[in-house]
Image (tube, rainbow, N blue to C red):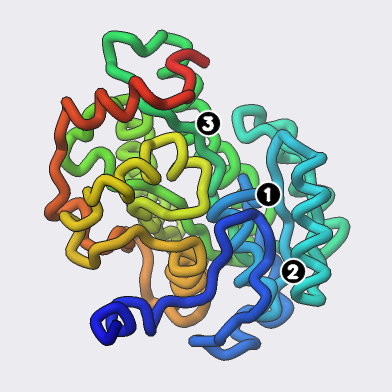
Amino acid sequence: MAEERTKTSDLPEDVESDDCMTSYTYIYSPDLLKDNVAFITGGGSGIGFRIAEVFMRHGCDTVIGSRNLERLNEAAKKLSAATGRHCLPLALDVRQPDTISAAVEETLKEFGRIDILINNAAGNFLCPATSLSFNAFKTVMEIDTMGTFNTSKVIFERWFKDHGGSIVNISATLGYRGQALQVHAGSAKAANDAMTKHLAVEWGPNGVRVNTIAPGPISGTEGYRRLGGMRAETSGVFHTIPLQRAGNKTEMAHGVLFLASRASSYVTGACLVADGGSWLTSANSLPALLGIASSSSSPAKL
């Protein structure tokens, strides 16, 4: 019991579902993002939802955007009720710059500013390269990589260029070792990591910081389900992770909060790996991953 308390005593609150937390303990000043506005793609669920909640608990108003307006509306109601801040749900497709531009214009009309961009929209599933359709690879690249560039470029040109701002890209460690069954997502995230560095260099003189966080297995997310997280947890695979567990969404939100806020005012072009040390030690086992893929309901085609 004492050992268990040692492992879990410092973990922040979280809930598995896409609901707000019933309690929250501040590790930063509650007004860290006071009167800021954050534009969060993929903010209606998973890590994006929790980022929005944590930001709002720190005084920030948010825009959450994705293709599913019904889900966004439901999420926005929950977020505003729990935090007392304004959350604006806007339908957009990060693959289509025109929809991003329309959402940005609506954001500026509503709030008059944008201080933070979180590029969280992504798509992924397990699939061997030989079974991966050309269209599936293209779609993941379009959502993850083109979507990150599209949203960053639109907001830079419309607002950040003249006012500065902070961009945080949500990445992954897939490309660090050549993860099996992940050529599509690993390639997309590796491109985003490079993009972070390039944009940090080019946009730094405009007062824009660009950083990345690379989560590991995070419970309570669609990616956790699709990529075999629950099976890995029950089979004891997480014992290969130095911290011996999956992360939670609030932990990721705290990492993003640091990178997005003045707490990291001299940090740009950086990648914060937040995976419990997993990429350093966990086995890259093709047979094990093939077993997860065969039992997964995730589609091999898009």
Q: Earlier in the sequence, mark 2 or mark 1?
A: 1
Q: Report x, y in % for residue 45.
A: 63, 49
Instruction: Residue under label 3, please give it.
Output: 143
Q: Earlier in the sequence, mark 3 or mark 1?
A: 1
Q: Report x, y in % for residue 188.
A: 37, 33
User: How much space separates mark 3 and mark 1, taking CA atoms?
Assistant: 16 Å
In this view of the protein, which residue sits in the foreground, 175 or 284? 284
Q: Earlier in the sequence, mark 2 or mark 3?
A: 2
Using the rendered image of the protein, determine whether residue 206 is visible from the camera's viewpoint: no
- Could you classify mark 2 by the number of other residues whose Cα lies within 10 Å: few (under 14), some (14-19), or many (20 or more)? many
Amino acid carrying mark 3 in the image: Ile
Can you tell which of label 2 and label 1 is closer to the viewer?
Answer: 1
Q: Report x, y in % for residue 291.
A: 27, 26
Amino acid carrying mark 1 in the image: Gly
Residue 61: assigned label = 2
Q: Residue at x 45, y 54 (%)?
A: 219
User: How much space separates mark 2 and mark 3, taking CA atoms?
Assistant: 25 Å
Circle 1 sits in a helix, a strand or a loop, which is it? loop
Residue 44: assigned label = 1
Compared with 300, 22 (above or below) is below
* Residue 264 found in image quarter: bottom left
Circle 2 sits in a helix, a strand or a loop, which is it? strand
Report the side of 144 relative to 276 (left or right). Answer: right
- Could you classify mark 1 by the number of other residues whose Cα lies within 10 Å: few (under 14), some (14-19), or many (20 or more)? many
